[in-house]
Image (cartoon, rainbow, N blue to C red):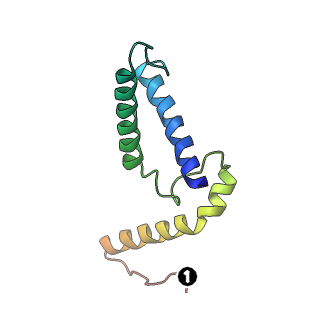
Amino acid sequence: DDDDDDDDDNDWMLADVISEEEGEHAEAAPDGKEKRKKKKEKTRDKINRLREEYNLDELERTPEVGESMADFYSRTARHWEAKAAEAVQAVRATEGGCVVANPSA
């Protein structure tokens, strides 16, 4: 499945970043499978925390691997317009202003 391949690509890119931040080398010492297994589990846990923290599983908020900024905007413009409208309505509601139910109508 292409989506699974993209997730794997993203996971490996995140793993590379994590390894660089921690000053670790990409490969574990050849002396033990257990060390490599633990390192993989630790990296996977970190990737999952980063995905959750930055909402990386939300396709409307996250560019795809290799996607240009223009393509990302074209694909997600309606999402961001809706978010902006929600934010404006929230501000108006807290300021006691008039809240329009559907400003584009």
Placement of 37 over or under 92, stated as above or below = above
Which residue is labeled 1 in the image?
A: 104
User: Which residue is at 49% across, 40% downward?
Assistant: 11
Q: Judge by depth and name the residue closer to the eye, 6 or 90.
A: 6
Residue 16 place in picture, x, y as percent: 51, 29
Residue 42 place in picture, x, y as percent: 35, 32
Residue 12 place in picture, x, y as percent: 52, 36
Regarding mark 1 in the picture, which secondary structure is present there? loop
Q: Quadrant of the N terminus?
A: bottom right
- Quarter of the rendering containing residue 96: bottom left
Residue 102 place in picture, x, y as percent: 48, 83
Q: Judge by depth and name the residue closer to the eye, 85 or 6.
A: 6
Q: Total label count?
A: 1
Left or right side of 6 for 66: right
What amino acid is labelled 1 in the image? Ser
**How many residues crowd around disc 1 within 10 Å: few (fewer than 14), some, or many (20 or more)?**
few
User: Which residue is at 41% across, 39% downward?
Assistant: 47
Which residue ends up furthest to the bottom in the rendered image? Answer: 105
Placement of 49 over or under 60, stated as above or below = above
Placement of 25 over or under 93, stated as above or below = above
Placement of 36 over or under 71, stated as above or below = above
Left or right side of 103 for 90: left
Q: Judge by depth and name the residue closer to the eye, 12 or 34.
A: 34
Q: Quadrant of the C terminus?
A: bottom right
User: Which residue is at 56% across, 41% downward?
Assistant: 9
